[in-house]
Image (tube, rainbow, N blue to C red):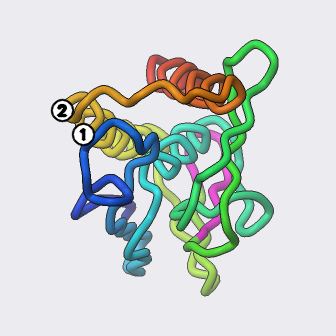
Amino acid sequence: MFSIKAEKLHWIDNADDGEDLCLHGHAIAIIGGEVLEYEDTTVSATALYLLKSITEDHIIYEDNQMLPCCGFFMIPDDDLQNVDIMGCPNGVDWTVKHDGDDVILITESGNETRIPLEEYKKEVFRFADEIEEFYKKSLPRKEPDDWYDKDGYTAFWNEWHRRRAN
């Protein structure tokens, strides 16, 4: 009832030189019977947004897209434990609402799919682990020179690992 995958994973200029902090790919989500996809998604941001959606509601087009085109600006909180990711307005989105032990996924076309939270969580973790594995197999990412970008990237992984551990 819900699945998500990423194909053709790559760094923005297709070179694994450690410079690009954001992983990209063709993302495909299946919600109910509806297929949602975006050709060049920032899948690293997608994975973090999905991890957040395990415990937080996400309302379509109120913030980021679940399959965002861009994620080029990371805003860390003061203790580097959470990050907001800003990008362009392009991408694909859907709503995630919590209802007891279930999540309700609502697509832009209005289709609603209810699934057990544990099933949703399992699929989100599988996707996030796949994305993180690509990072691990790639060259280490180079630390940004700008302290704000560095803090944003640090907060990104701090939030990721905290949410994945729970």
Q: Which residues are magenta?
A: 93-103
Q: Is residue 166 left or right of residue 71?
A: left
Whether residue 95 is in magenta: the answer is yes
Q: Quadrant of residue 130?
A: top left
Residue 74 versus residue 13 in the image, above or below: above
- Secondary structure mainly formed by the magenta segment: strand
Badge 1, how many Cα within 10 Å: few under 14, some, many 20+?
few
Locate the N terminus and report the quarter of the image it occupies. Answer: bottom left
Q: Quadrant of residue 17?
A: top left
Q: Could you tell me the amino acid type at mark 2?
A: Lys
**Residue 57: image location, x then y, percent:** 71, 48
**Residue 43: image location, x then y, percent:** 42, 53
Q: CA distance from mark 1 to mark 2?
A: 5 Å
In this rendering, the count of numbered labels is 2
Name the residue that disc number 1 marks. Answer: 134
Residue toward you, 32 or 161: 161
Residue 3 versus residue 109 in the image, above or below: above
Outermost residue to the top: 79
Outermost residue to the front: 145
**Residue 105: image location, x then y, percent:** 57, 63
Badge 2, how many Cα within 10 Å: few under 14, some, many 20+?
few
Q: Residue at x 76, y 58 (%)?
A: 63
Q: Are marks 1 and 2 in contact (CB under 8 Å)?
A: yes
- Label 1 SS: helix
Q: Residue at x 57, y 80 (%)?
A: 111
Name the residue that disc number 2 marks. Answer: 137
**Residue 24: image location, x then y, percent:** 38, 57
Q: Is residue 53 left or right of residue 59?
A: left
Q: Residue at x 57, y 51 (%)?
A: 103
